Amino acid sequence: MLDTLSARQARFITFEGGEGVGKSTQVKRLQQNLQRHAVEVVRTREPGGTPKAEAIRSFILQGRSESWGAGGEAVLFAAARLDHVTQLIAPNLANGTWVLSDRFHDSTRAYQGLTGGVAPRLIAALEELALNGHTPDLTLVLDMDPEKAFKRVAERAIEDGLAQTGDRFEKEELDWHMRLREGFLAIARDNPDRCVVLSADQSPEALEAAIWDVVSQRFPELLGGQPT
Ligand code: Z5A
């Protein structure tokens, strides 16, 4: 019988990248793979993860915060994150439960900071407040051409019976997403010990296997080795 790993050090893993690169799909698959190795693990997302943070998520994703500008939105994302860390992430890690988050602080760095223009010192101050020392152990940056990722999102919208939003494909929007992609790659370059970039332009199964390789090498205790 497999020993539970929950008594050992719990790990905090985040998934980052642009829209439609397959983060949600891979967070679920990694959760299943970890559970197969007797790891207690919770899956969460940002913005969201707790009732208060989900309320902020609805407010933002309905477009109601747009007029607040990138600075106001950075504050809202940080407020949601503070509750998420305090109420969900920190207690689970303290109890030995691994935490997988679909987006985390790098999204604020990339969206509100690098592409939104909020100064790095302000982003850093909000991060210090919201994370309270809970920096991820590993961040998987899923990277692919935004134009191809948009096609996936459009196909999903059609499958879900939702209207396709043609303006997403406008040139200006695409340029913005190209800059966002570069922003995530720059974050990964600046944080080589924490971040691993993986091509998201491969089948879900191939990407799942690539993620498992990274995770099991980073945390050898999963396969019976000594923690690093
Ligand atoms: N935001 C911010 O600005 N600042 C912050 O601090 C935070 C967030 C935390 C959250 O949106 C928005 O908030 C986001 C950033 C901002 N805005 N944008 N853009 P969200 O959570 O609603 O959306 P998202 O994070 O961008 O996720 P998404 O669109 O759902 O994409 P995804 O999770 O990366 O992909 P997916 O749902 O797994 O897959 C998309 C489709 O592709 C789906 O039909 C899959 O079946 C398919 N798929 C998945 N993988 C593959 C592969 N490998 N091949 C082919 N097809 C695939």
Image (cartoon, grey):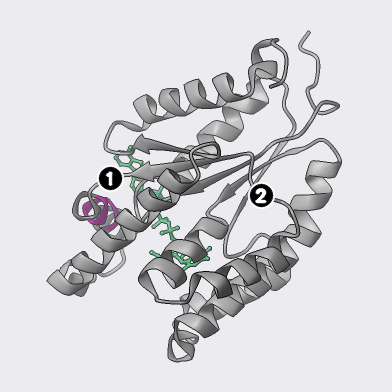
For disc 2, the marked residue is: 135
Q: Position of residue 10 (x, y in %)?
A: 76, 34
Query: Which segment is the magenta one?
Result: 149-153
Would you say the residues marked 2 and 1 are in contact, meaning their CB atoms lie under 8 Å apart?
no
In the picture shown, does residue 106 fall above or below 143?
A: below
Q: Earlier in the sequence, mark 2 or mark 1?
A: 2
Describe residue 127's horizontal placement relative to residue 181 as left or right: right
For disc 1, the marked residue is: 144
- Residue type highlighted by circle 2: Thr
Of the two numbered discs 2 and 1 in the rendering, the one whose residue sits closer to the viewer: 2
Q: Nearer the viewer, residue 157 or 43?
A: 43
In the picture shown, does residue 39 fall above or below 94?
A: above
Res 148 seen here? yes
Tell me the residue at 77%/37% (across/down): 97
Q: Point out the residue furthest to the bottom here.
A: 67
Q: Secondary structure at mark 1?
A: loop
Q: Position of residue 211 (x, y in %)?
A: 47, 29
Q: Secondary structure at mark 2?
A: loop
Q: CA distance from mark 2 to mark 1?
A: 25 Å
Quadrant for ligand 1 reads: bottom left
Is residue 151 found inside the magenta-colored segment of the image?
Answer: yes
Q: Position of residue 71 (x, y in %)?
A: 51, 82
**Majority secondary structure of the magenta segment?**
helix
Describe residue 151's horizontal placement relative to residue 91 as left or right: left
Q: Confirm or reject: label 1 Cβ below 8 Å from ligand 1.
A: no
Tell me the residue at 71%/72% (across/down): 52
Q: Position of residue 7 (x, y in %)?
A: 86, 27
Quadrant for the N terminus in the image? top right
Tell me the residue at 40%/38% (across/down): 197
- Residue type highlighted by circle 1: Met
Describe residue 169's horizontal placement relative to residue 130 as left or right: left
Describe residue 101's horizontal placement relative to residue 209 as left or right: right
